[in-house]
Structures are given as structure tokens and as C-alpha cells.
Image: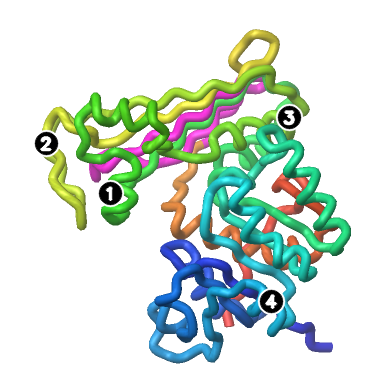
Amino acid sequence: MKMRKIRVVQFGLGAMGSVMARMVLEKKDLELVGAIVRSDEDNGRDVADLVGLKKKTGVIALNKPEKVLKSIDADVMLHAAVSYVPKVWEQIKPAVKAGVNVVTIAEEMGYPFVKYPKLCKEMDAVARRKDVSILGSGINPGFAMDVMPVMLSGICEQVKSVKVTRVIDFSPFGPSIQKNIGIGLGVEEFKAGVRSGKLPLHIGLPESAHMLAAGLGWKLEKVVETRDPVVARKRIRVPKYKTIVPGQVAGFDHRCFGMRGGKVVITLEELGRVDPKVEYKNTIYLKGKPDLVESVNVPLGNVTTTSHAVNLTPVVVAARPGLLSMLDLPPAPVLADR
């Protein structure tokens, strides 16, 4: 008997959402049935025009979520629009109330239970009432710095501390991302941006720390973040942006420390660079019995985060209802193309 395809609606067709929509269109077990956009300019246009495809899809993007959800029978909504939990809930609530499962790549949704306990109870209650699941995941939070270390710990007799270092190449990204992480700024200007919150750098490190701790059965007493500039010592040409000269910011070191029993037991390092000669990789260090060191090439988030979200759709549709994290789900293998 032929199984029905999973019917997907895409919320957000920006840099990440466009990649997700194209991927859905390529998967044999998925069907794109709707698209939600936020701008009047994109309203009423075929998805193909918004994601760079030549062949029309017949799916028209609309900026009225309720209208889209009432006009289609969707199984899951892929959400790629904002990073912070309160705004995410505002945007996905209509889908949840309509009985549609949600996978969001919003960083704070990776493990929102510690920072937003009251809001999480509300989201969980609505999802359970409507018999659907809500999941936040991507490459980080959701995989590289939390799920992978938890899985590796399964071959250890004992784990005393965890350190994950992720060195990321930001040079392929466009001007908006470069500005958001302070590339080309002076050191004092960078520090002022961090203090004011204008330069959050990576969003989601505390969420990864708490998810990792929960997976290991630990409860963190305190989480501390530090954000420092990396200063260029040579001229670096950043494609599609500008040339960085010595003394200007050419990257950042964003660290998160999780405390337990008065000691640092979790260290997460997100090290962003725009230097093409740097070795970019993700390394996990488990201190225990035995000690483990595992390195893996983790490509850019516009590939890995989007792929992970799309591949999770059947897992989330089959999951128990409520607000979930990756700790609640089995691994999601790659979906077959058409």
C-alpha cells in the first residue's frame, strides 16, 4: 500500500527557509502544500519565484498564516524566521492550534525549558491538547554541541566534564551576517556592540549547555558566557563584503561555561573566523573513563541546519505530542530524493 506523503508548509522564505523549501520539493516522501511569508512584496507569489527555481510549484506564498492554515491540510510546519522563544510562539501558535506539528530552527527553541519555564508549559499544554509536537533543532543547538556529545558518552564508563570546540568559517556569508558578528569593526566598537546586545554573535550556547547537561543527568547551577573579538594580524579579503586590515575584527570567540558542584563541567566554544587558511572543524572532548576526543567536519549551518530540520519531519510527525527537545527523539536519517 502506498503511503501518503507528509504535507509540509514552510514559514519563512529567507536565506534558511528558501533552502528548506527547495529541499522539501526534492524529497520523495514530502509534499510542499503551503508557504507563509512576512512581507507584502512576497505575498501572492509562487514559491519558485522566491527560492530561485525556474519551474513553477503551484504553491502560492501568503502573508496571512491563518489563511494558509485554513486552506490546506498540513502535517508539519517548518519554521525559519526568528531566534527568540516569545516571538517564535507568537508565529507558530496558529499552526499548533490548527493541529499542525512544528519544527523550528529558532536557536532558543533547541532547549527553552530553563530560560522560559512558564511559556514552555503553555506551549506544551496547547500542543498536547491539539495532539501535535513542537521541536526546535538545527546544527547547533540540536546536534553538534549537545546531541553528539551525549551520544558519544554512551561508550564511556564515566564522564566528568565535556568540552566542545566548533571553529566556523563565516567568510561565505553575505554582508548582513558579517555585520551581525562584527567583522571589520574596531575592537572597542565590537565590545560596545556586545555590551549593548547589538552583537549577540551565536544564539543558543546556553540552550546547548542545558540540553547536554540534561542528557548526562546533570543539573547546572550556573551558566556564564564570554564574547571576545579576534583581531586581524594581516589583510584578509572577505568575499562579497570587504577587506579586513590589521587591527580590525576578523572573527570572534564566544564561550559558554556550565557550572556544577562549583566546577566548570561543560565548556562550549563557538569560534567564528573569516580567514580561509584556518582549519574549520568540530571537536568533542570527553574527560572521564576513558577520555575521548572526536573531531568531525561540520559544514555551514545553511546546509546542516536546514537539512536536519527537513529530515526531522517524519520523526516529529510520529512523536508523542507536546514541546520536545532532541533528547526525546530517535536519530533522523537523511530522506530519499525523488
Q: Amino acid at mark 3?
A: Leu
Residue 279 seen in render: no
Left or right of 307 on screen, residue 281: left
User: Which mark identifies residue 216?
Assistant: 3
**Secondary structure beneath disc 3?**
loop
Q: Select label 4 or label 2 by which is in front.
A: 4
Dominant secondary structure (helix, strand or loop) of the stretch shown in magenta: strand
Q: CA distance from mark 1 to mark 2?
A: 15 Å
Q: Earlier in the sequence, mark 4 or mark 1?
A: 4
What is the C-alpha distance between the residues marked 4 and 2? 50 Å
* Label 3, residues with CA under 10 Å away: few <14, some 14-19, many ≥20: some
Dot placed on the residue nearer the N-terminal end, 1 or 3: 1
Q: Is residue 155 above or below residue 103?
A: above
- Label 4 sits on a secondary structure element that is helix
Q: Residue furthest top?
A: 262
Give me the C-alpha separation between circle 3 and circle 4: 39 Å
Residue 216: image x %, image y %?
Answer: 73, 29
Bounds of the magenta segment: 266-294
Residue at 86% x, 56% y is: 128
* Foreground tag (4 vs 1): 4
At label 4, the amino acid type is Leu
**Dot 4 surroundings within 10 Å: few (below 14), some, or many (20 or more)?**
many
Residue on which disc 4 sits: 69
Q: Residue at x 56, y 38 (%)?
A: 145
Give the CA distance from mark 2 to mark 3: 44 Å
Q: Is residue 254 above or below residue 299?
A: above
Residue 76 belongs to magenta span? no
Under mark 1, the amino acid is Ser
Mark 1 highlights which residue?
171
